[in-house]
Amino acid sequence: QVQLVNSGGGSVQAGGSLRLSCAASGVTFSSYCMAWFRQAPGKEREYVARFYGGTDSTYYTDSVKGRFTISQDNAKNILYLQMNNLEPEDTAMYYCAAFPGNCIGRVQQFHYNYWGQGTQVTVSS
């Protein structure tokens, strides 16, 4: 049974940093596409980044490139999202997601079978 538990959110000022965690059970990172999505109030959930452990491939949406880094700790089965130089526009609930396969083209919610409960990130100007 797959379970994803999010943590690490909080409130920071613009320019600050946060690291989000997603503790995964029932998931083999080498064969799963792991992703982060976010949802701001009144907006649809949007894709942020994804990681495929089978090839150590990482992908990002344009708005976070150069500021966010997705990574995995295979020994602990934890997915991370390091977020630097945060902007007020990054304020949202952040969710990790998992799909048992590669990451090619997987940027929509319906591509993922499993979801964490979310963790709130608030960035003030």
Image (cartoon, helix red, strand yellow):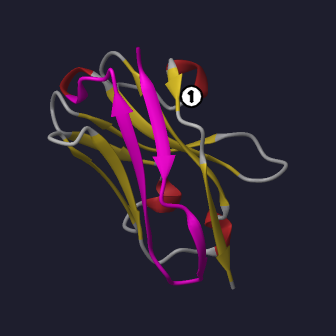
Over which residues does the magenta segment extend?
A: 1-29
Tag 1 secondary structure:
loop
Decide which of 8, 52 is in the foreground and name it. Answer: 8
Residue 112 percent location from the top left of the image: 50, 22
Q: Is residue 12 positioned above or below 70 on the image?
A: below
The residue type indicated by label 1 comes to Gln
Is 121 on the left-hand or right-hand side of 68?
right
Residue 124 percent location from the top left of the image: 69, 80
Q: Is residue 100 positioned above or below 98 on the image?
A: above
| Quadrant in the picture for the N terminus | top left
Neighbor class of circle 1 (other Cα within 10 Å; few <14, some 14-19, many 20+) is: few
Q: Which residue is mark 1?
A: 108
Decide which of 66, 71 is in the foreground and name it. Answer: 71
Decide which of 38, 103 is in the foreground and name it. Answer: 38
| Quarter where residue 122 is shown | bottom right
Residue 95 percent location from the top left of the image: 55, 42
Q: Is residue 62 positioned above or below 109 on the image?
A: below
Q: Is residue 71 positioned above or below 97 on the image?
A: below
Is 95 on the left-hand or right-hand side of 49?
right
| Quadrant in the picture for the C terminus | bottom right
Q: Is residue 14 rendered magenta in the image?
A: yes
Is 54 on the left-hand or right-hand side of 124?
left
